[in-house]
Amino acid sequence: MSDDAAAGDESRRPGPHADVLREYDKERRQRQRRRFKEAHDDRAAEKQARRDARYRRRRRREPYLRAAIRVVERLPLWLATRLGEWVGAAIFRFCSVPRRRVLQHLRLAFPAKTECERAAIGRDCLRLMGRGVVSLPALRRKGVPWILDHTDVVGEEVLREALDGGKGAVAVTFHHGPIVVGGAWLGHRWGGVEVGRNARTMDTLQLLVDVREALELAIIERGNPRAIIRALRENRPVAMLSDHDVANVNGVFVPFFGLLAHTPVGPAVLSLRTGAPIVVAVNEWVGRTRYRVRFLGLLRARDDLPRDEAVH
């Protein structure tokens, strides 16, 4: 077989989840999607009532949270991160709902580990989450130059290769590490934009939005595809968080820890429609006051597969 023929066969190889797609044929997956949407619609009133109740609680807590933010933003960054770790550990120990949710997910991810080992991992997860949230006000005070000086970047050539095609890049990451640091670096180093949403009250999400605004980061409101496509046509990277389980957006079921999980397909659809490659990135803590942005790889849309399979 010639090299050209071999390359052609390689380009037409099955998609990464072709075996799953064969097991779960299109009609079966469509039925599962319909059941998912129907269950969501049946619970829409209940969900709305919970959202309204949560909104009222947040409104009552908002003055206290704003006062706490004013105090924390005056702390040294290292002290704010230590405080956040203590808060996260206290939540794991004394708040049963988040502890139960974390342990439930860890049982799926690490079935071979003991309950004590999973508890240690869960405690560290919430410690890091607390570190990230509580340090946001102090990080806002530091500003962009300080953030860039304290951020190491690994694999920047991956992003450069993606942008060399002239069609922009979809930078996909997830809720891990100091995501605002990665956004600041991407925005000020490469003119990148982030896809996000606003919040009705002062909570963790709105705090993150405020920090992004203070750092002069370009934000595209979620649900505005024209602005996203415009940024890609300008050959800019567009950063998206892809680990939301959002029932009211288009999604597919893909294997995740042995289960079929509903996963939004926005980044994949953008890549298929625009030709922009997907760059996978991770934001990491190196220390309490130092960070790392790591680009893991480059994914390009395939035009030799049916659209339904290419999205996977």
Image (cartoon, rainbow, N blue to C red):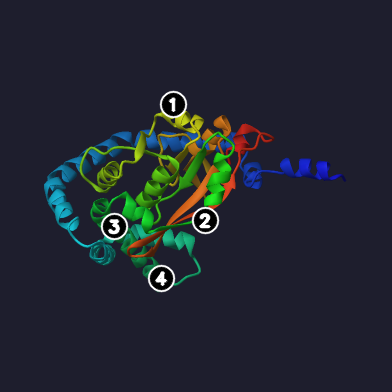
Give the mark nearest the N terminus, 1 or 3: 3
Indicate the position of residue 63 as horizontal and vertical percent values: 12, 47
Q: Is residue 194 above or below residue 130?
A: above
Question: Label 2, label 4: how many angstroms apart (C-alpha)?
Answer: 18 Å
Q: Give the secondary structure at mark 4.
A: helix
Question: Label 2, label 1: how many angstroms apart (C-alpha)?
Answer: 34 Å
Q: Nearer the viewer, residue 165 or 19?
A: 165
Q: Is residue 10 above or below residue 42?
A: below
Question: Label 4, label 3: how many angstroms apart (C-alpha)?
Answer: 17 Å
Q: Would residue 66 appear left or right of 178 to someone viewing this image?
A: left
Q: Residue at x 22, y 43 (%)?
A: 54
Q: Is residue 182 above or below residue 80?
A: above
Question: Label 1, label 4: how many angstroms apart (C-alpha)?
Answer: 47 Å
- Amino acid type at circle 2 is Phe
Q: Residues within 10 Å of mark 3 (few under 14, many from 20)?
A: few
Q: Would residue 4 appear left or right of 253 to someone viewing this image?
A: right
Q: Give the secondary structure at mark 3.
A: helix
Mark seen at residue 115: 4
Indicate the position of residue 35 as horizontal and vertical percent values: 47, 36
Mark seen at residue 68: none
What residue is disc 1 on? 226
Mark seen at residue 257: 2
Mark seen at residue 97: 3
Give the mark nearest the N terminus, 2 or 4: 4
- Amino acid type at circle 1 is Arg
Question: Label 1, label 3: how many angstroms apart (C-alpha)?
Answer: 39 Å
Q: Residue at x 81, y 45 (%)?
A: 6
